[in-house]
Image (spheres, rainbow, N blue to C red):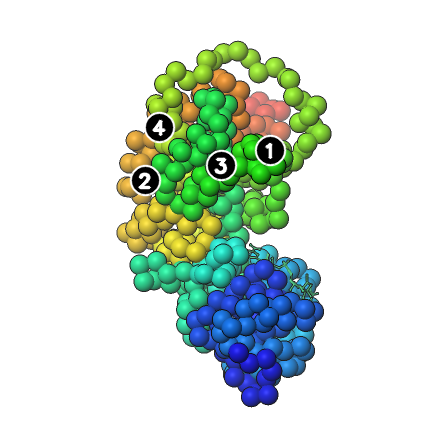
Amino acid sequence: MTIDNTEGARAQIGVTGLAVMGSNIARNFARHGHTVALHNRSIAKTDALIAEHGSEGDFVRTETIEEFVAALQKPRRVLIMVKAGDPTDAVIEELASAMEPGDIIIDGGNALYTDTIRREAALRDRGLHFVGAGISGGEEGALNGPSIMPGGPKESYEALGPLLESIAAQVDGTPCCTHIGPDGSGHFVKMVHNGIEYADMQLIGEAYNLFRDALGYDADQVADVFTDWNAGDLESYLVEITAEVLRQKDAKTGKALVDVIVDAAEQKGTGRWTVKSALDLGVPVTGIAEAVFARALSGSREQRKAAVGLASGALADKPADAAQFTEDIRQALYASKVVAYAQGFDQIAAGSAEYDWGLHPADLATIWRGGCIIRARFLNRIKEAYDENPKLPSLILAPYFRDAIETAIDSWRRVVSTATLLGIPVPAFASSLSYYDALRAERLPAALTQGQRDFFGAHTYERVDAEGKFHTLWSGDRSEVQA
Ligand code: NBP
């Protein structure tokens, strides 16, 4: 270990921002044989990292940005891992003033993709490469292999790709890292990834709720079901950790930990960003939206307290066949998950078209197979589906998923109807099923909507049997005119 930079510019990568994520990524680089220059606004984190983990590899301790930049080989590569927002702009400005044309600044934080577009353009004007890189996998992934989604100029990937690929998770010998596309595309894709994560977690939560409230299972019993599911098509990181969380006992009370945790879910914002962007792009990401709203509702604690005891009705008995209902929930979870991913991939296609990014859905499915929070066996199927037909109109239409939903459909309906009759909320299961039914419907009530819009606002409508736009003279003789 080296703790000064008197040997000059010898670090292959610099990491600034050494909190949880930055320190673990810096260690990951060092463990893979790269010399890593370390920098943090306050020196304490740098020194703590060196004191605790300095023996893991070759680190260069620096205090000032000038020292930090001077420690780097050219083209200089700096990974920023600070709190997203204003701190990122502040650090970029400091770095850009000290760096030279051709150097590369990578923002590995959870930046809003429109900020990344703005920053990339500004730094391009100064001759610097700016790479907005989505990084997923949390603390553990950062240390042992995350999924990395770098955007930005293609040329910068030549100097950066091998470094990032060396620390990424590997699945079947393929790194979970690839160049995503220009400017903000890496952060956009990471945002949608997080949105899908919200939907997946909500669906798992609804399944758990059904076991608890419809079948009366305790946390251990539900954990057993999830462990079992993790050996099949639902195998995934989130299903695996669900079993672990459910099995955890609270040291203080001896109860299941999940039963002493306040049932109000928090959010940091990427789910909300996904939904806002989907609204702007006009893409119905209903599963993700339900998940974001479900967290918001759970957090309305005063309102919920006041509403406890409202009528639930008395229309249904608990399911008589627990084994059948368990299988129904498994099928409903799988089918709803297909919908959540299909919607997420639709949003990625829409973003790609809007910003002319040329994104490849199969590549994303490939790099999400390992390292990230939504890693799942199921992603192999998504990759195959897009490899076979990169222009799939919807993931739901890929033969494999079409068949899977056909198998699941009756179970899915039984779960949603049973939950509804029992008064158990299943917003994501139900809205995914409605989305599916709307997508496959030959006629939607949108014709009536168009009629109403024409009635009150003369917004016109199209006809099924003629080209052009039409308007009915609602306040006149109600004849039709061509608009
Ligand atoms: P935090 O998001 O908690 O940020 C703490 C770091 O930001 C510290 O190094 C702090 O320096 C630095 N910082 C701040 Br705050 N303001 C600064 C400023 N004005 N100038 C310079 N540095 C400043 O760290 P984190 O949880 O490790 O996350 C880092 C990034 O990675 C975030 O964008 C986050 O959204 C993203 N991310 C996190 C996860 C996760 O699981 N935590 C996963 C994926 C991505 P100091 O030590 O001097 O205060």
Q: Earlier in the sequence, mark 2 or mark 3?
A: 2
Q: Earlier in the sequence, mark 4 or mark 2?
A: 2
The residue at which mark 3 appears reads as 246
Q: Amino acid at mark 2?
A: Gly
Badge 2 vs badge 3, beta-carbon distance below 8 Å: no
In this rendering, the answer to whether 310 lies above or below 42 is above
Question: What residue did someone put label 4 on?
Answer: 327
Q: Give the alpha-carbon distance from disc 4 to disc 2, as whole Å.
A: 12 Å
Q: Quadrant of ligand 1?
A: bottom right
User: How crowded is the residue under tag 4: few (<14 C-alpha within 10 Å), some, or many (20+)?
Assistant: some
Category of crowding for the residue at label 3, using alpha-carbon neighbours closer than 10 angstroms: few (below 14), some (14–19), many (at least 20)? many
Q: CA distance from mark 4 to mark 1?
A: 33 Å
Query: Label 1 belongs to which residue?
Result: 253
* Residue type at the position of mark 3: Leu
In the rendered structure, the answer to whether residue 247 lies left or right of residue 311 reads: left
Proximity of marks 4 and 3: CB atoms separated by less than 8 Å: no
Secondary structure state at the residue bearing disc 2: loop
Q: Residue furthest bottom?
A: 7
Instruction: Say above or below: 429 vs 170.
Output: above
Q: Nearer the viewer, mark 4 or mark 3?
A: 3
Task: Give the residue number, with chain letter if any, for mark 2.
Answer: 232
The residue nearer to you, when weighing 328 against 63, is 63
Q: Could you classify mark 2 by the number of other residues whose Cα lies within 10 Å: few (under 14), some (14-19), or many (20 or more)?
A: few
Q: Residue furthest top?
A: 314
Q: Which comes before the other along the chain, label 4 or label 1? A: 1
